[in-house]
Image: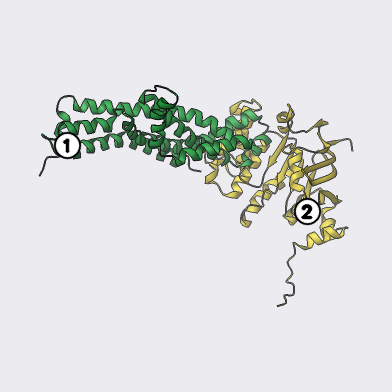
Chain colours: A green, B yellow
């Protein structure tokens, strides 16, 4: 049997470099997810409200983000702004901006959906028990919204993690880029490295995303109504 | 009638151009059970929602113990604590157990001690035969059980008056009975109630007074339910009651 090419990972600091690359991807995902969740909650509450103009603006924003491939957004923010506005954004800033811009739109839509899916009668029956508006929200609406939201937003986070593999297109050395570099550097001595190294990268993504996905499934089951 | 607990005077309720209740007056004495019947869309459910200030009103006033019941006023949640309401369905909180559903408002709103409320809730649950379900979630209960829990939840706030808004309308026929039995025992124990229902034989059995509404108005009112159901004095009430009797008509083809 041919070698799987995993051996290259044990040469020099290759494995440590791969982990560093994974950390870059994780860092961008973490910061973007945190920003997206915070801003998305605000956006979702506004979208579930009654103001037609705000709803219209967010609708356009959401559709724009959905239609545009993330890579195009990355190119616009990283290369485009440098030329047009003279901004000198680092690749990491650009990446965080793009993923937060995308994540906020998606999260906003999730929050909006969760909020409007709570039946009106829940508000009425809480008020009928003498609760003021703050208590209605705190004890009745918010807990139900969060229960609906957590599985959905965890799914969004795993999507963000996976999509960060695109940031190597704007020159960031994340896990996939490191993998490519290792393969290139060892082309002659380990021609099979492409298989082994990418398989390890796949495993790394799996190890990061799988527990998150399991947690979502668990919560979904536990909170099923 | 000055001993009225609840007084509705010249109530008018409209959604934009569409008037749902026009100039309706009704006063309810302590311990009285009033059943409101009428065709759908006559404004009977809206009337109950107005009494609990879940709807804004466009004219007249509603007084409970002489205090106005008005939506969007600062003390409205205080007034609502004196009014218990049970809806058609889906009013239990799905994320809380039966016990938590019942104790939430008495503990958080009325600031009563948790153990005291739990004891009271347990006693009431025992009475309706659901004590062993106290740690279940609403999704684990049947429709009839949910409605009985909703009644207990309202009772635990010690309301002065109960509003029941078609509480059996969404239930399977075999579950209607268990809910109505609970309501009847409440009536016997002296609760003041305003009941909207389509269960005519139940209305006849429980009512101290029957109110027949149509087009946002009280068309007929009777302190003799037996008599009303046997011989309503208005033509409209007669026609309405007739719809509950199924007589095969002639089908022409």
Name the residue furthest right. Answer: B1
**Chain containing the residue with disc 1:** A
Query: What x and y, as percent, mark residue B15?
Result: 76, 43
Say if mark 2 contacts mark 1, CB within 8 Å.
Answer: no
Query: What x and y, as percent, mark residue A211?
Result: 34, 35
Between tags 2 and 1, which lies in front?
A: 1
Q: Quadrant of the N terminus of chain A?
A: top left
Query: What x and y, as percent, mark residue B166?
Result: 70, 49
Query: What x and y, as percent, mark residue B202?
Result: 73, 53
Camera-side residue of B33 and A161: A161
Residue with the mark numbered 1: A193
**Seen in the image, is B48 located left or right of residue A67?**
right
CA distance for labels 2 and 1 = 80 Å
> Could you tell me if residue B147 is visible in this image?
yes
Residue with the mark numbered 2: B38
Identity of the residue drawn at 26% across and 27% down: A19
């Amino acid at each position: 049997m041919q070698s799987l090419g995993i051996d290259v990972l044990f040469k020099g600091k290759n494995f440590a470099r791969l982990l560093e690359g994974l950390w870059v991807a994780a860092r961008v995902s973490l910061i973007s997810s945190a920003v997206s969740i915070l801003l998305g909650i605000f956006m979702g509450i506004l979208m579930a409200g009654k103001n037609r103009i705000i709803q219209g603006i967010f609708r356009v924003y959401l559709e724009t983000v959905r239609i545009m491939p993330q890579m195009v957004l990355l190119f616009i923010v990283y290369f485009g702004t440098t030329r047009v506005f003279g901004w000198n954004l680092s690749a990491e800033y650009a990446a965080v901006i793009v993923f937060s811009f995308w994540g906020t739109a998606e999260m906003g839509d999730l929050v909006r959906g969760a909020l409007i899916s709570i039946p009106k009668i829940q508000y009425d029956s809480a008020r009928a028990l003498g609760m003021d508006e703050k208590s209605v929200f705190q004890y009745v609406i918010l807990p139900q919204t969060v229960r609906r939201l957590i599985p959905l937003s965890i799914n969004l986070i795993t999507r963000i993690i996976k999509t960060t593999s695109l940031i190597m297109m704007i020159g960031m050395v994340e896990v996939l880029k490191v993998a490519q570099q290792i393969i290139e550097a060892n082309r002659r001595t380990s021609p099979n490295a492409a298989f082994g190294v990418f398989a390890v990268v796949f495993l790394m993504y799996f190890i990061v995303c799988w527990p998150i996905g399991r947690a979502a499934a668990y919560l979904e089951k536990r909170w099923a109504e | 009638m000055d001993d009225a607990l609840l007084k509705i005077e010249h109530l008018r309720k409209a959604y934009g151009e569409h008037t749902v209740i026009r100039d309706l007056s009704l006063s309810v004495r302590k311990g009285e059970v009033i059943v409101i019947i009428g065709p759908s869309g006559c404004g009977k459910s809206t009337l109950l929602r107005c009494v609990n200030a879940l709807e804004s009103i466009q004219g007249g006033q509603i007084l409970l113990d002489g205090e106005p019941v008005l939506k969007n006023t600062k003390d409205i949640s205080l007034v609502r604590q004196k009014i218990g309401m049970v809806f058609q369905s889906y009013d239990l909180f799905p994320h809380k157990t039966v016990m938590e559903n019942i104790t939430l408002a008495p503990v958080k709103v009325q600031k009563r001690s948790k153990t005291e409320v739990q004891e009271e809730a347990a006693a009431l649950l025992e009475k309706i035969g659901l004590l062993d379900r106290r740690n279940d979630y609403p999704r684990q209960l049947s429709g009839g059980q949910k409605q009985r829990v909703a009644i207990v939840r309202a009772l635990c706030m010690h309301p002065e008056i109960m509003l029941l808004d078609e509480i059996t309308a969404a239930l399977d026929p075999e579950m209607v009975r268990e809910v109505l039995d609970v309501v009847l025992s409440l009536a016997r124990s002296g609760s003041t109630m305003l009941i909207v229902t389509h269960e005519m034989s139940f209305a006849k059995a429980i009512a101290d007074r029957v109110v027949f509404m149509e087009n946002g108005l009280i068309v007929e009112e009777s302190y003799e339910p037996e008599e009303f159901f046997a011989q309503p004095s208005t033509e409209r009430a007669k026609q309405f009651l007739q719809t509950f009797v199924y007589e095969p008509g002639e089908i022409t083809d």
